[in-house]
Amino acid sequence: MIPDIQKIARDLMVSPKGILAADESESTMKTRLDPIGVAHTTENARRMRELFFGTPGAEEYLTGVILYESSLEEKMADGTSFPHVLEQKGIIPGVKVDIGHRDLPNFPDERLSYGLDALEARLEHFYSLGARFTKWRSVIRIGDNIPSDAVLSANAHVLAHYAALVQAHHMVPIVEPEVLYDGTHTIERSRDVLERTLAVLFETLRAYRVALPGLILKTSMALPGRESGTPLHAPDVARETVAALTAAVPKETAGVVFLSGGQTPAQSTENLSCIASHGTLPWPVTFSYSRALEEEALRVWGGRDDRVREARDVYLKRLKLVAAARNGSYHKEMER
């Protein structure tokens, strides 16, 4: 393994910081802007990203930012490219490289991620624009008789192939097999699926000879299904999540970062804190949130230039809370 990859991975996991997932696709960006009454245009999407990337002090809480590939070439109002702005703050630019997910024939309600075609050429381009790590997301749905072994294996092979290519191009791969929150399943079922998903993934990563000290896992937490009627209880989430991860994730993995996956900002912060304080873990853990970091600030901003400063203050407050959670020192009272 190239030494620089391992160093970048370590730098991304530096305590007490985490990673902002600002890699919203066009469709996801619409879901960010519509609720705050802002038209979904290219310029408004750029302004939204500038709101977060230009926040003074964000570097105290972030090691990296995951960009959507078109954002690597977008610029601040002063003409400075987004990657350069982040680099000036000591924040490592990254990029989402999967192209999405497709229904898999013969496997109802299951999907396969794609985008390996021409990935090598894209990686070279992304590296030239300043990206030093990447992310690839697969989605795993829980339901009757799913996920199937075949689809878990298929997604694991895609993730492993991707990770090997990224390391060969001197960048750190983040692998994200997201077990979806949607459904009526129990938290125990979520833990079982999460553990099974990760066991298959890491077996496949080893088969592809991916260097685990230069790889980061992005994972969902073990949660009862959104439609199950079961409220989230942080000690239960922590217990089941840690059980799944310690059973399936090798200790030499560079780190584990959590996605918020539909949780509210407060829920995702409290659950992370409970996981982090659950005991000594074999790898560092932190956050890689998107909506859970951005949502409150976006409501304050509402697309108005005169509210940028106030929105950034709200964003910094959430970053501070989540950074505290990463070290297990967040308390509900801090939300007040």
Image (tube, rainbow, N blue to C red):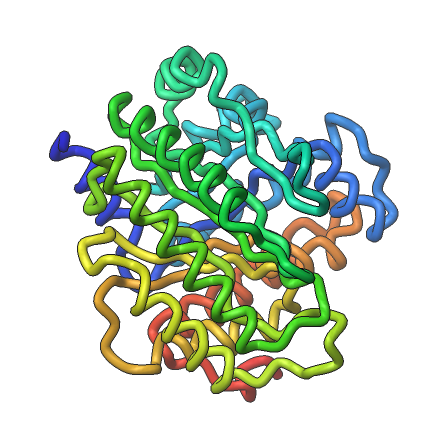
**Nearer to us in this view, 244 or 331:** 244
Q: Position of residue 169 (x, y in %)?
A: 28, 21
Residue 75 drawn above or below residue 297: above
Rendered image quadrant of residue 327:
bottom left
Q: Is residue 41 above or below residue 227?
A: above
Q: Residue at x 18, y 54 (%)?
A: 252
Is residue 25 shown left or right of residue 329? right
Residue 75 sits above or below residue 239 on the image: above
Q: Is residue 94 visible?
A: no
Q: Percent from the top left, x then y, of residue 173?
A: 35, 37
Q: Which residue does the image show at 34% across and 33% down from the upper left? A: 163
- Give the quarter of the image for residue 156: top left
**Relative to residue 22, is residue 182 drawn left or right?**
right
What residue sits 24% from the left and 62% below the top? 283
Residue 111 in view: yes
How many numbered marks have been drawn onto this rendered protein structure? 0
- Residue in the picture at 81% in, 34% down: 40
Between 24 and 281, which is closer to the camera in this rendering? 281
Please provide percent x and percent y for residue 174. 38, 42
In this rendering, would 181 be left or right of 41? left
State the quadrant of the N terminus: top left
Return the x and y of residue 249 as percentages of the image width and height. Answer: 30, 59
Seen from the viewer's position, the closer of residues 112 and 245 is: 112
* Quarter that holds the C terminus: bottom right
